[in-house]
């Protein structure tokens, strides 16, 4: 089975990684691909002195570091949970794409059997205003999608905390 796991490093994504690790049996010959997507940044202001460009570079550098950490942490969690299982794990950071699009595109190209994402548990209005990666993936992925909701007692709605 080919399983694509999308993570943003949040507790919701971490719970999704834990859940999928718990579903796999030692006999199952699976390929897991853990990805994190770094959205493109844009600043609507021009800057003759380079201050905005410096801020842009720092923001981009920070986002890339967070994405690298997210996939590395997910890989460690999977490897420790799946010790002895017949599972191969790869990781990838996708840069300068919107998560909704990147996840669906990769699921299609890689011919995934399953996409796993965490849900931030946004309410109706937040989802309407902010959009939802998990909702877009559910509606557009070429395969089954597992959206993992964390225990609502452990997470405050709409945050990564």
Image (cartoon, rainbow, N blue to C red):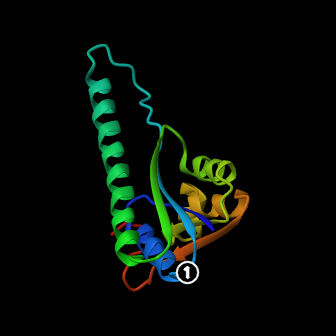
Q: Residue at x 57, y 65 (%)?
A: 125
Q: Residue at x 67, y 48 (%)?
A: 109
Mark 1 surroundings: few (<14), some (14-19) or many (≥20) residues within 10 A: few
Q: Quadrant of residue 54?
A: top left
Nearer to me, 14 or 26: 26
Q: Secondary structure at mark 1?
A: loop
Quadrant (top left/top right/bottom left/bottom right) for the C terminus: bottom left
Q: Quadrant of residue 83?
A: bottom left
Residue 99, given in percent of the width and then of the height, sits at 54, 50
Q: Quadrant of residue 27?
A: bottom right
Q: Which residue is mark 1?
A: 27
The number of callouts visible is: 1
Nearer to me, 127 or 36: 36
Does residue 119 show up?
Answer: no
Nearer to me, 154 or 67: 67
Residue 62, given in percent of the width and then of the height, sits at 29, 43
Quadrant (top left/top right/bottom left/bottom right) for the N terminus: bottom right
Q: Is residue 25 left or right of residue 46?
A: right
Residue 18, given in percent of the width and then of the height, sits at 43, 76
Q: Residue furthest top?
A: 48
Residue 92, given in percent of the width and then of the height, sits at 46, 49
């Amino acid at each position: 089975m080919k399983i694509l796991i999308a993570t943003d490093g949040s507790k919701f994504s971490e719970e999704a990684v834990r859940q999928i690790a718990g579903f796999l049996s030692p006999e199952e010959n699976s390929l897991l691909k853990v990805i994190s997507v770094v959205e493109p940044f844009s600043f609507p202001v021009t800057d003759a002195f380079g201050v905005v460009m410096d801020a842009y570079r720092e923001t981009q550098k920070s986002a890339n570091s967070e994405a690298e950490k997210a996939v590395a942490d997910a890989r460690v969690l999977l490897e420790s949970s799946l010790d002895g299982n017949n599972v191969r794990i790869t990781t990838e950071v996708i840069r300068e794409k919107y998560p909704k699009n990147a996840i669906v595109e990769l699921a299609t190209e890689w011919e995934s059997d399953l996409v796993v994402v965490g849900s931030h548990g946004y309410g109706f209005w937040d989802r309407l205003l902010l959009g939802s990666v998990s909702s877009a993936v559910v509606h557009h992925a070429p395969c089954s999608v597992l959206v993992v909701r964390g225990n609502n007692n452990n997470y405050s709605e709409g945050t990564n905390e």
